[in-house]
Image (tube, rainbow, N blue to C red):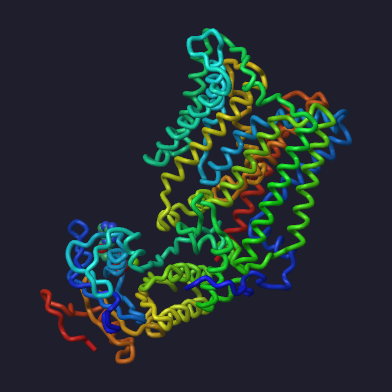
Amino acid sequence: MSVTTEPVQEFDVANPEESFLTRLWENFKGGNLGSAPVIFGLTIIVIVFGFTAQNFFTAVNFINIITQMSGTTMLAFGVVFVLLLGEIDLSIAYLSGVAGVMAAELQKPDSGHHFTGIWPIIIALVIATLIGAFQGSFVALIGVPAFVVTLAGLLAWQGVIQVTLGAAGPIIIENRWINYTASYFFSATAGWIIAGVLIALYLLSVGLSLRGKRRHGVTVRYPWLVVAKVIAIVGVTLLVVAICNHDRGVPLPGLIIIFFLLTLTYITKRTTFGRHVYAVGGNAEAARRAGISVPRIRIIVFMISGFMAGVGGVMLAGNLRSVAPDQGGGTLLLDAISAAVIGGTSLFGGRGEVRSAVLGSAVIATIQNGLYIFGFQPGVIYITTGSILLFAVTLDTIARRRQAKTGR
Amino acid sequence: MSDETPVLELRGISKSFGSVEALSDVDLEVRRGEVMALVGDNGAGKSTLIKSIAGIHSVDSGEILFEGNPVSISGPKDAAKLGIEVVYQDLALCDNLDVVQNMYLGRESHNVLQVLNEPVMEHRTATTLKSLAVTTIRSIRQPVATLSGGQRQSVAVARAVMWNSKLVILDEPTAALGVAQTEQVLSLVRRLGEQGLSVILISHNLHDVFEVADRITVLRLGRNAGLFERTKTTQEEVVRAITAGKPTKVSGIAMEETS
Ligand SMILES: Nc1ncnc2c1ncn2[C@@H]1O[C@H](COP(=O)(O)OP(=O)(O)O)[C@@H](O)[C@H]1O
Ligand SMILES: [Mg+2]
């Protein structure tokens, strides 16, 4: 069969009378909720706090929230990949701690292993990625359940941090690159240039996609939706930069979030690897029969998880400008996993988006921030986050059951 | 290659699993554009035979000729290279992926940077489904989880024929389907034959077999127990071969066709 450019109408427009809303409703009934619930929830949370909490709706606080959520978001990016496979990685929080401690140790000026510039960061990230590969190999090649492998990692990496820092105590970080990852601010002009570049890239990708469709005679399903999306994304980008410039400027951690959001989304949606991740998560046996190397996909995903934990670890270390024996502890692990799930990524594999890491982290960080302004103690914050997590997982489970029912 | 050369010819295939002799000295011939039904009781060796053709099992002895040339098939990739595609009983689709993504699973169209070429895949999926008259699917961008059993089976079959395949093997394609959906899949099978593809159809349901098959090969206890032409036989005769058929071959010497 040769590819012709004659337009193929039947399947593209499918059912011309079917409106966008009908399609949305069908998706909903089919268990495909996407990001709608979390965006809705986040809007409500922002509105409620905006009206009730003092100084919540300010440029300063906006930047604070971005900085506070950045480290968790990095870990949550990795969680999304692991959850897409239907696996779990419990080691990421202490693995991020190992990366932070490693970077801090390597930048110590008076030690025998002093590295300057960004080398401590690069080495820490390589080590974190290798640890991810090591853990993933047990899952992919031997078949040890990921839960157990990474639980062992959770214990072991916590131990490594304590052994390393136990005698010496906290390490102060003077390497400016590490500290920049959490607290560098771009000038107002640089902020606008960044906005311009991002918008240009976005418009370019939309244009290329439309051109590709036209060339192959594929019709654009909802042209006005494309236009609405373009306007919304350009508007939000400009608004965010304007708000940031009102205070200290665009924070580097915010730009790092955007960078990984775009890169990882591209990888999941536009590359064969990303497609295969979804396939393995949806039906590993089908993927295997289709000639996909399932172990290879699994190992790479655990490497991504390790790498993103490393990035988060460096940013969290930079945020405090030091590392302590409890690095990677506290609620970091639970926040990162909750973020991905609250953001709409399924615990059952095969369904989810990279952006759910950002959306979920934003929900958690905003709630923590707002309740903190009100003067609530951490206990109340945990109760709230826990309730939202339960709600999100329930929604996911119902959606999955719906999907099972609609099928066949 | 003349038109009379069978697409696939198996000669004296034997296969044991330990002491279980799953296949002994089995012959099978499939001509171009022919729908060959493979029938037999549970455990007769049907699945084992097609797994040998698909390269999932290696055979202990016997010869496989594809388009007249002896071939050795030592993996699913070898089979695919020859143009042999198998649609397994349990479908092997990913529920979370849409129709296009499933059609191209593991064989995505991409550039050197492994970036997917969606328009090409979408267009060709639509063309393939259209050429097979699979038109009940509302949108090829809907997840296969939302499709009916018949539609899912159609997608699985369409995926098999999209790759310039010459021989499509269907293992019990109608086993889990209702009457209307079975009809849908059977007419698809008939269309494959009309388009010059060869089909091996495994089925328990003789009614289905008699609706679409050109010839029927019966296996019993791992041996050939009959070869019938659909127009010259009856369901009763085939049932008798399935349940009580005598081996039609003794020590490598082929006997007359039973029909
Ligand atoms: N992987 C295997 N290991 C051991 N025995 C097998 C295996 N596969 C099939 N068999 C045996 O081979 C015989 C034929 O099985 P099969 O080909 O599945 O029959 P059918 O598909 O006709 O029902 C049966 O006795 C079965 O138990
Ligand atoms: Mg069988």
Instruction: Locate residue B162 relative to residue A10 in the image: left or right.
Output: left
Observer-nearest of B30 and A341: B30
Q: Position of residue B29 (x, y in %)?
A: 26, 78
Q: Single out the residue that lies furthest toward the bottom.
A: B232
- Number of numbered discs visible in the structure rendering: 0
Give whichever of A192, B198 is nearer the camera: A192
Q: Quadrant of residue B99?
A: bottom right
Give percent across and percent down for residue A288.
41, 54
Q: Is residue A21 visible?
A: yes
* Residue found at x 58% / y 51%: A269
Vertical side of A293 occupied by B162: above or below: below
Say above or below: B58 vs A75.
below
Residue B43 at least partly seen: no
Quarter of the figure with residue B196: bottom left
Seen in the picture, residue A243 relative to B210 is either above or below; the reply is above
Residue B193 image position (x, y, % from top left): 40, 81
Q: Quadrant of ligand 1?
A: bottom left
Residue at the spot 64% in from the left edge and 43% down from the top edge: A262
Q: Quadrant of the N terminus of chain B?
A: bottom left
Where residue B259 appears, as percent x and y from the top left, is 24, 89
Residue pictured at 59% horizontal, 12% vertical: A170
Position of B145 relative to A133 (above/below): below
Q: Residue at x 77, y 47 (%)?
A: A234
Residue A54 shown left or right of residue A218 in the figure: right
